């Protein structure tokens, strides 16, 4: 089933590093509230998604729990997204709809695909065309586009039909930036990545004006005032005028988060600040972006833990798997068991 939230539609934003999910593993016993699940996801709107089953053959179902470990929704859906703006997209028998935080079906499961709510609107797909609904399930825009991506900063990327140009619509469904690009990304900090017919990337503002020339081979969204861009095999961080701020000598990098960007050199990960200074030398075999002041990292033995923004070990590397902190908690795994910890490493839910 196509994941309409994270569709790959021709543009892979440069060097957005893959974040680790908690490894699925056989739970030794179901003596704890979380012991019955095979996978945990981060909290969003005070609710976390949980998953049962490890293979398509045995069947994978998803549900939701609150911070007390109570099941808001039993794992009965074939697919689900995290809560966003009070609603979560769920699917059963290849039909998608939305549930509220009590687990009640707020919008009937009737669509071929949906997107998360953003700016009060969500994408819906019917008969290979996409439109928009509001949180009451009312049709705001009848399905007519091949693709509508999620709204960001009041605008959403659209593509009229397969192989056609991309543009943007506003929340009323009006085409405010006409489809003339071969691909566009979502707006971030007032600018959006666009690609021309020659495969070159640059940036436009909300009026559709090119503000950074389409001259790059790769480009990523702006984050904390900077964006990663590549040209002729060399990469750098640029500011919103297109000026090179940090010249990179690494194999890859991620966007800035909490003031730091992840870097990779010869398969090892570290971090730099906005001046390009190395805060953590590339030494970890795997790592994540900073979230709420901490980042998970893994050593050569694939033991996971967390470091702070000074590069110091905040939580010892003694977990089998780890995820980003969200709403003060992070899901981790150890010795076949899954649980949530706080920023001091205390188990808060198991």
Image: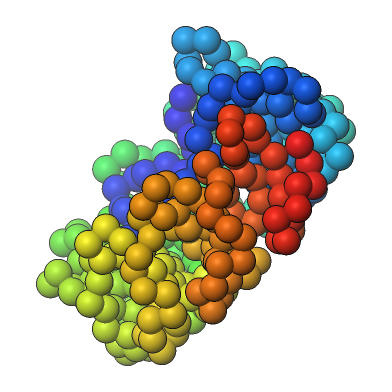
Residue farthest to the top, as pictured: 57
Percent position (x, y) of residue 106?
Answer: 80, 31
Instruction: Name the residue located 49 percent from the left edge and 81 percent from the top edge.
Output: 225
Percent position (x, y) of residue 348?
Answer: 79, 47
Locate residue 333: give its quadrant: top right
Instruction: Please indicate whether residue 227 sits to the left or right of residue 247 in the image.
Output: right
Residue farthest to the left, as pictured: 232
Q: Quadrant of the C terminus?
A: top right
Q: Is residue 60 above or below residue 259?
A: above
Q: How is the image coloured?
A: rainbow
Q: Nearer the viewer, residue 102 or 140?
A: 102
Q: Is residue 242 visible?
A: no
Q: Is residue 77 above or below residue 259?
A: above
Q: Is residue 308 visible?
A: yes
Q: Is residue 257 above or below residue 82?
A: below
Instruction: Please indicate whether residue 136 sits to the left or right of residue 292 in the image.
Output: right
Percent position (x, y) of residue 335?
Answer: 58, 33
Q: Nearer the viewer, residue 188 or 350?
A: 350
Instruction: Name the residue located 49 percent from the left edge and 62 percent from the top edge.
Output: 289
Instruction: Name the residue located 82 percent from the left edge and 43 percent from the top edge.
Output: 67
Instruction: Name the residue located 55 percent from the left edge and 49 percent from the top edge.
Output: 318
Locate residue 103: give its quadrant: top right
The number of numbered badges drawn on the structure is: 0
Locate residue 77: give its quadrant: top right
Q: Is residue 180 above or below residue 138?
A: below
Q: Nearer the viewer, residue 73 or 252?
A: 252
Percent position (x, y) of residue 247?
Answer: 27, 83
Instruction: Please indicate whether residue 319 sits to the left or right of residue 196 in the image.
Output: right
């Amino acid at each position: 089933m196509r994941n309409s939230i994270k569709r790959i539609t021709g543009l892979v934003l440069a060097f957005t590093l893959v974040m680790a999910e908690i490894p699925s593993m056989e739970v030794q016993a179901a003596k704890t509230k979380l012991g019955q699940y095979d996978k945990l996801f981060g909290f969003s709107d005070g609710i976390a998604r949980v998953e049962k089953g490890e293979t398509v053959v045995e069947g994978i179902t998803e549900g939701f729990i609150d911070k007390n470990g109570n099941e808001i929704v039993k794992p009965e859906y074939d697919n689900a997204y995290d809560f966003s703006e009070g609603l979560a997209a769920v699917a059963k028998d290849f039909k998608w709809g939305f549930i509220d935080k009590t687990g009640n079906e707020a919008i009937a499961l009737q669509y071929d695909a949906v997107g998360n709510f953003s700016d009060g609107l969500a994408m819906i797909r019917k008969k290979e065309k996409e439109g928009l609904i509001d949180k009451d399930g009312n049709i705001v825009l009848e399905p007519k586009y091949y693709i509508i991506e999620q709204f960001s900063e009041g605008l959403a990327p659209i593509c009229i039909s397969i192989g056609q140009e991309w543009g943007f619509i506003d929340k009323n469904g009006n085409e405010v930036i006409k489809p003339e690009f071969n691909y566009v990304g979502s707006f971030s900090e007032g600018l959006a990545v666009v690609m021309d017919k020659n495969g070159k990337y640059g940036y436009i503002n909300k009026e559709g004006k090119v503000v950074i020339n389409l001259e790059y081979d790769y480009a990523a969204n702006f984050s904390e005032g900077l964006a990663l861009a590549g040209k002729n095999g060399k990469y750098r961080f640029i500011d919103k005028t297109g000026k090179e701020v940090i010249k990179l000598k690494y194999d890859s990098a991620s966007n800035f988060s909490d003031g730091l960007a992840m870097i990779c050199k010869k398969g090892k990960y570290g971090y730099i600040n906005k001046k390009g200074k190395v805060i953590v030398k590339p030494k970890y075999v795997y790592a994540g972006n900073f979230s709420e002041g901490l980042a998970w990292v893994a050593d050569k033995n694939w033991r996971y833990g967390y470091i702070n923004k000074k590069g110091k070990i905040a939580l010892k590397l003694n977990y089998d798997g780890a995820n980003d902190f969200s709403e003060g908690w992070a899901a981790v795994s150890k010795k076949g068991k899954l649980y949530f910890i706080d920023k001091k490493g205390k188990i808060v839910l198991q």
